[in-house]
Image: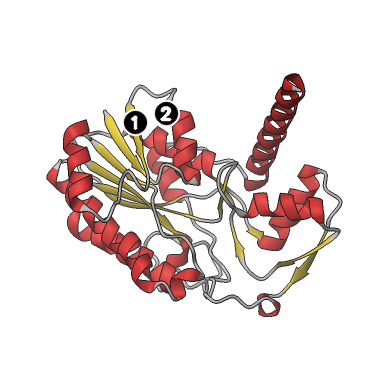
């Protein structure tokens, strides 16, 4: 099976590249500037040349605050790019796996969001991702839409890496405590996606929306405290309300996702967010030690 992964330089795409070496399937990884997902010509050409059976879209416009003023760019990537991929999936009889977000919800729920709950995005980013989902449902004959939240990894820029940097530089940090969700280790999500691809029936048509995050619930404050604790940093973290740190784009105050469906359908066991955080921090520590040893050897 030939799998085209877009957004290969992002957090999830990078984790998939690590896992792909152990898979029996053939993965092809592309990102800008080699592939523009808003170009039907480019995507169609690659699908034909590579004989693609699965399109996995990890590409997205994710600058939440910038999207409020860069509206056209956000919709061009998140909505129009999704439509292009859906059309190419249809033309090449391929499965489309699309990554979406908890930002399609407004955060007013008091219980974990199910896939069937109404989407009411608060800002441009969430709306552009929601409209991208809708284009896929309208166009693609076979698809998985998988919403996730609070993604982090050893790659790219994310909350964990920011906290590690600031925690080493400062003695005190203020972090919001009234935004609640679940951190998701990109390596866990990547493993779940590979599991699904290993077990899905290519002769069937799927039209499924799923939720995936790690288990458990956390505020950004709780997350930051855990990072400092597990990393052995002495930086003190204080809880503050979002109103004290106003941001351009509105954020959902509650975006915990119910993962019952994906666990039931694919037999997934999902780790708790704190356990996965410990795994990542150990990976970063080992990578740092290895780099330091190599530098000493060279010198």
Up/down of 208 relative to 26, above or below? below
Residue 229 falls left or right of residue 13: right
**Quarter of the image where one finds residue 45:** top left
**Disc 2 element:** helix
Q: Residue furthest top?
A: 297
Disc 2 + disc 1, Cβ < 8 Å: yes
- Give the camera-side residue of 218 and 135: 135
Residue 54 picture location, percent across and down = 27, 38
- Residue where numbered disc 2 is placed: 20
The residue shown at (16%, 36%) is 48
The residue shown at (77%, 43%) is 231
- Give the camera-side residue of 256 and 172: 172
Up/down of 106 relative to 217, above or below? below
**Quarter of the image where one finds residue 170:** bottom right
- Residue where numbered disc 1 is placed: 27
Residue 223 falls left or right of residue 9: right
The residue shown at (48%, 73%) is 106
Residue 232 picture location, percent across and down = 82, 44
Residue 293 picture location, percent across and down = 75, 24
Spatial separation of the CA atoms under disc 2 and disc 1: 6 Å
**Quarter of the image where one finds residue 224:** bottom right
Can you see residue 141? no
- Give the camera-side residue of 41 and 237: 41
Residue 292 picture location, percent across and down = 74, 29
Q: Residue furthest front?
A: 299
């Amino acid at each position: 099976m030939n799998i085209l992964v877009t957004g290969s330089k992002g957090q999830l795409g990078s984790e998939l590249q690590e896992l792909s070496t152990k898979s029996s399937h053939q993965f092809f990884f592309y990102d800008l500037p080699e592939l523009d997902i808003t170009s039907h010509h480019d995507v169609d050409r690659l699908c034909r040349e590579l004989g693609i059976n699965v399109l996995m879209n990890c590409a997205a416009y994710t600058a939440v605050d910038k999207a409020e003023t860069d509206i056209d760019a956000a919709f061009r990537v998140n909505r129009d790019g999704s439509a292009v991929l859906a059309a190419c999936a249809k033309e090449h009889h391929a499965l489309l796996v699309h990554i979406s977000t908890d930002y399609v919800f407004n955060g007013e729920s008091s219980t974990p969001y199910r896939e069937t709950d109404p989407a009411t995005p608060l800002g441009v980013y969430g709306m552009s991702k929601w409209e991208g989902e809708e284009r896929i449902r309208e166009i693609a004959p076979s698809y998985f839409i998988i919403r996730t939240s609070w993604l982090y990894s050893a790659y790219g820029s994310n909350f964990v890496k920011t906290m590690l940097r600031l925690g080493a530089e400062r003695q005190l940090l203020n972090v919001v405590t009234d935004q609640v969700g679940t951190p998701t280790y990109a390596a866990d999500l990547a493993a779940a996606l590979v599991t699904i691809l290993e077990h899905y029936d290519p002769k069937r048509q799927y039209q499924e929306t799923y939720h995936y995050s790690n288990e458990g619930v956390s505020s950004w404050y709780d997350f930051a405290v855990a990072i400092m604790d597990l990393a052995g940093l002495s930086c003190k973290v204080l809880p503050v309300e979002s109103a004290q740190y106003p941001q351009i784009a509105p954020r959902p105050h509650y975006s915990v996702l119910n993962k019952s469906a994906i666990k039931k359908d694919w037999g997934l066991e999902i780790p708790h967010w704190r356990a996965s955080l410990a795994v990542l921090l150990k990976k970063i520590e080992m990578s740092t030690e290895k780099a330091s040893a190599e530098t000493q050897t060279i010198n």
